[in-house]
Image: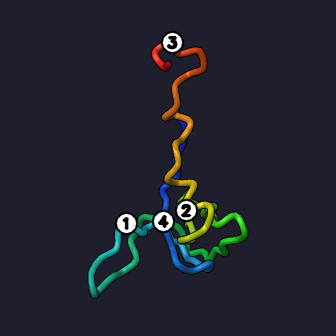
């Protein structure tokens, strides 16, 4: 099985990640004990950047990388020589 990173779409080229993105609280938000130190990342011409701590992938909206995440992945294709595919 192929590893697929958690993907976060963004509108800016500069993003921050602390590994606790899905653990946010309400108005009195306090950083979660889970996660990692906050790092700032810059999306380059590829249209995405991966966090070195948690492997979360930040994809720039409208980039070629965003269109690529909606395409068929290798796991969706039949194996070569599969007779059930005409």
Where is residue 28? Give x, y as percent. Answer: 28, 86
Where is residue 6? Give x, y as percent. Answer: 48, 56
Decide: is 51 above or below 31.
above
| Residue name at image x 43 percent, y 68 percent | 20
| Residue toward you, 2 or 47 | 47
Label 4 to label 2, Cα distance in Å? 10 Å
| Residue name at image x 42 percent, y 64 percent | 34
Residue 48, disc: none
Decide: is 26 above or below 59.
below
Label 4 to label 3, Cα distance in Å? 38 Å
Q: Nearer the viewer, mark 4 or mark 2?
A: 2
Where is residue 4? Give x, y as percent. Answer: 52, 47
| Residue toward you, 4 or 27 | 4
Label 2 to label 1, Cα distance in Å? 21 Å
Q: Residues within 10 Å of mark 1 (few under 14, many from 20)?
A: few
Q: Nearer the viewer, mark 2 or mark 3?
A: 3
Are discs 4 and 2 less than 8 Å apart at CB?
no
Label 1 to label 3, Cα distance in Å? 43 Å
Q: Earlier in the sequence, mark 4 or mark 3?
A: 4
Q: Earlier in the sequence, mark 1 or mark 3?
A: 1
Residue at numbered disc 4: 8
Q: Earlier in the sequence, mark 4 or mark 2?
A: 4
Q: Secondary structure at mark 1?
A: helix
In the image, 81: left or right of 29?
A: right
In the image, 37: left or right of 29?
A: right
Label 2 to label 3, Cα distance in Å? 33 Å
Q: Residues within 10 Å of mark 4 (few under 14, many from 20)?
A: few
Are discs 1 and 3 less than 8 Å apart at CB?
no
Q: Earlier in the sequence, mark 2 or mark 3?
A: 2
Residue 22, disc: 1
Residue 83, disc: 3
């Amino acid at each position: 099985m192929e590893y697929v990173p958690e993907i976060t779409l963004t509108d800016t080229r500069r993003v921050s990640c602390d590994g606790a993105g899905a653990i946010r609280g309400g108005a009195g938000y306090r950083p979660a004990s889970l996660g990692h130190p906050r790092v700032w990342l810059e999306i380059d011409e590829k249209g995405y950047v991966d966090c070195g701590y948690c492997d979360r992938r930040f994809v720039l909206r409208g980039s070629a990388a965003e269109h690529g995440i909606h395409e068929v992945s290798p796991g969706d294709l039949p194996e070569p020589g599969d007779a059930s595919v005409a």
